[in-house]
Image: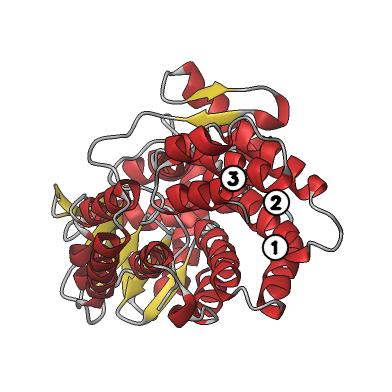
């Protein structure tokens, strides 16, 4: 490795992409192309970065397996930064194995981190945790240790473990001081700020208040019957009644929860469940049928009883019934929550993270764009979507993603 390449690599490792470009910007050999690509990625020009890294991979010879594997890792990192979550994971796994086989433990660990980070973004928490467990922490740099702890904190946040998340972020903060890279320190600060941002809202006894992550964790461990509108389920301690695939029943349960300890009028239930502003006998008959179904499903945790004007929810052992919902509610709140992380997302990546079809997500994006809440740039496969940061709204690290039932 010549002195300019070594100096450029050192500049990139310390978060100085402009210093790196000053040393290799006029060179077209494979190592210089790779370093230029990484520098452009650090500067935010992700499409140019991807092109340079691919050129570098093609320029390296077939005997330079380690260098080519490093290019694959770099391209995967660029794809992750641009929220292109459909990149070929098998190629990254093969690159990680190659780096391991040739003794490049640091870059092999980085490849495994990227795999874990992708799994975290699409809500596959168990797999992400297993992948992080495979990292050889003795081989990681301070910078990668920051990223590792951020991923650990992200998993803890998704699982509503505020204490574990704060502990991981404290370790990330310490590693960031050793790394001395301002962008990493800023990322840790942003994650810490998330913990002080409302993660949900509580609706109880006709009032509402915002909840931090610690508050949500405490609520779910309490004796309250929680109608969870973030995941469309009803829970009392460890007893869970999933209603995600029963939207009518969940609408009825939520309406009863919002009315507790009083009853919910039949007319209100008809509007919430069926949108029936002018109900006839057929609507009332259907309401009786759906209430019967809800009564059977909720039998382990609560009783649904008829009253003179409607129905009332009566928890068995819980002290109260409350509704937990997102901090901002609208038709496409889940899409907004992902866009609120400040990165540019492709519609395919959003669909993967939300577990929906790409066409459904595209319709949601078009609706948000028409109302000025989202904007697109680029064309075709390079098209990306962003939105301004929403004040008082958690990012994708928190409740919008699927969470475990326990």
Q: Is residue 380 visible?
A: yes
Give the number of the disc on residue 231: none
Alpha-carbon span between mark 2 and mark 3 = 21 Å
Q: Quadrant location of residue 311?
A: bottom left
Write down the residue under mark 1: 92
Could you give the CA–CA distance between mark 3 and mark 1, rounded to whole angstroms? 19 Å
Tell me residue 282's x, y (percent).
Answer: 54, 42
147 horizontally vs 116: left or right: left
Q: Which residue: 63% across, 56% down? A: 1
The residue that mark 2 highlights is: 87
Q: Examine the rendering and report whether any part of residue 350 can be seen.
A: no
Judging depth in this view, the residue of 217 and 66 nearest the camera is: 66
> Distance between the Cα atoms at labels 1 and 2?
9 Å
Q: Is 120 located above or below residue 207 in the figure?
A: below
Q: Is the image coloured rainbow, by chain, by secondary structure, or in one colour?
A: secondary structure
Q: Position of residue 242 (x, y in %)?
A: 48, 68
Identify whether 133 is placed above or below 122: below
Quick one: label 3 or label 1, which is nearer the N terminus? 3
* Nearer to me, 371 or 222: 371
Q: What is the number of the mark on residue 35? A: 3
Q: Are marks 1 and 2 in contact (CB under 8 Å)?
A: yes
Write the residue at 34% across / 52% down.
184
Give the camera-side residue of 208 and 97. 97
Judge from the rendering whether residue 335 lies leftward or rightward of residue 228; answer left or right. Answer: right
Q: Quadrant of residue 221?
A: bottom left
Q: Residue at x 70, y 62 (%)?
A: 92
Residue drawn at x 62%, y 44% as measured from the top left: 84
User: Image quadrant of residue 346?
Assistant: top right
Earlier-in-chain disc, 2 versus 3:
3
Which numbered mark, 1 or 2, is in the foreground of this view? 1
How many numbered marks does the figure carry?
3
């Amino acid at each position: 490795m010549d002195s300019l390449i070594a100096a450029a690599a050192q500049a990139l490792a310390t978060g100085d992409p402009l210093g790196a470009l000053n040393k290799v910007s006029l060179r077209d050999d494979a190592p210089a192309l790779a370093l230029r690509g990484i520098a452009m990625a650090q500067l935010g020009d992700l499409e140019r970065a991807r092109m340079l890294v691919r050129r570098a991979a093609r320029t390296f010879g077939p005997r330079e397996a380690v260098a080519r594997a490093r290019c694959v890792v770099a391209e995967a990192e660029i794809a992750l930064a641009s929220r292109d979550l459909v990149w070929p994971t098998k190629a990254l796994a093969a690159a990680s194995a190659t780096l391991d086989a040739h003794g490049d433990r640091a870059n092999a660990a980085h490849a495994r981190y990227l795999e874990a980070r992708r799994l975290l973004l699409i809500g596959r928490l168990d797999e992400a945790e297993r992948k992080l467990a495979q990292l050889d922490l003795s081989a990681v740099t301070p910078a990668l240790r920051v990223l590792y702890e951020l991923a650990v904190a992200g998993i803890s946040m998704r699982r509503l473990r505020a204490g574990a998340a704060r502990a991981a972020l404290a370790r990330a903060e310490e590693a960031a001081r050793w790394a001395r890279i301002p962008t990493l320190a800023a990322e840790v600060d942003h994650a810490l700020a998330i913990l002080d941002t409302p993660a949900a809202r509580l609706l109880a006894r006709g009032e509402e208040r915002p909840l931090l992550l610690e508050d949500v964790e405490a609520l779910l461990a309490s004796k309250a019957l929680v109608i969870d509108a973030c995941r469309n389920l009803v829970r009392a301690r460890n007893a869970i009644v999933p209603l995600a695939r029963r939207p009518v029943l969940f609408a009825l349960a939520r309406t009863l929860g919002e009315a507790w300890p009083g009853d919910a009028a039949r007319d209100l239930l008809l509007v919430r469940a069926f949108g029936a502003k002018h109900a006839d006998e057929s609507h009332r008959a259907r309401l009786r049928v759906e209430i019967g179904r809800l009564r059977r499903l909720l039998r382990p945790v609560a009783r649904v009883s008829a009253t003179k004007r409607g129905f009332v929810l009566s928890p068995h052992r819980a002290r109260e019934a409350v509704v937990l919902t997102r901090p901002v509610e609208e038709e496409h709140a889940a899409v907004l929550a992902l866009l609120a992380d400040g990165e540019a997302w492709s519609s395919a990546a959003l669909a993967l993270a939300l577990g929906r079809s790409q066409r459904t997500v595209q319709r949601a994006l078009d609706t948000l764009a028409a109302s000025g809440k989202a904007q697109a740039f680029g064309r075709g496969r390079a098209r990306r979507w962003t939105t301004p940061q929403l004040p008082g709204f958690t990012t994708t690290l928190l409740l919008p993603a699927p969470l475990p039932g326990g």
